[in-house]
Image: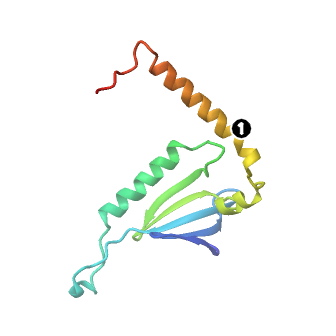
Amino acid sequence: LQRKIGAGAYGGVFAASKAWDDGSRVAVKVIDVLSVGENPNDLGRPAALDSKKTREVRTEVQCMKAVAGHQNVCSILDSYLCHGLAYIVMERCDRGLCQALDLLPALDEGTLRPFVLGADRRANRRRSMIFSPRTAPQRRT
């Protein structure tokens, strides 16, 4: 692992070079899945795996595998559990979402108007198809 490039509630993301392949740049998400001892007398004992954290990591990996191959999603390359840490190895993006959004042109009313009006027309057309005069619900008085 090289330098830390991000952090979240459960762990950190590190830049790395994929040593077992062609040396391509990857990101490795490292998540601590050990349970925190609630009993102060347990300080000297090895911590056990937290089943909830482990299940959440497995779910995350399954979700990433399910959307693998989509052009707008980072591909998962590998995942493993070692010494109480879960590692998720994925392709590394050059920029995050905020940096990508900063590169987009500013949206003004003129740019958005056709999209909003088009969506409104489609919604009204669907509404009229669902509630045609013959099938429109009767109002209660």
Q: How many marks?
A: 1
- Figure quadrant of residue 57: bottom left
Q: Give how far across and how far down residue 42 sits, in percent.
A: 24, 83
Residue at 71% over, 42% down: 113
Amino acid type for the residue under numbered disc 1: Pro
Q: Nearer the viewer, residue 68 or 23?
A: 68
Instruction: Determine if residue 122 is in view.
Output: yes
Q: Residue furthest top?
A: 134
Q: Give how far across and how far down residue 55 sits, in percent.
A: 35, 56
Q: Give how far across and how far down residue 122 sits, in percent.
A: 59, 28
Q: Nearer the viewer, residue 70 or 101?
A: 101
Question: Considering the image in quadrants, where does the N terminus appear?
Answer: bottom right
Instruction: Determine if residue 24 is in view.
Output: no
Q: Give how far across and how far down residue 18 sits, in percent.
A: 65, 61
Q: Is residue 89 above or below residue 6?
A: above
Q: Is residue 35 left or right of residue 71?
A: left
The residue pinned by badge 1 equals 114
Q: Is residue 62 above or below residue 99?
A: above
Q: Is residue 46 left or right of residue 6?
A: left
Secondary element type, mark 1? helix
Residue at 64% over, 47% down: 72
Label 1 Cα crowd, 10 Å radius (few <14 / some 14-19 / many 20+): few
- Figure quadrant of residue 56: bottom left
Q: Is residue 49 above or below residue 72?
A: below
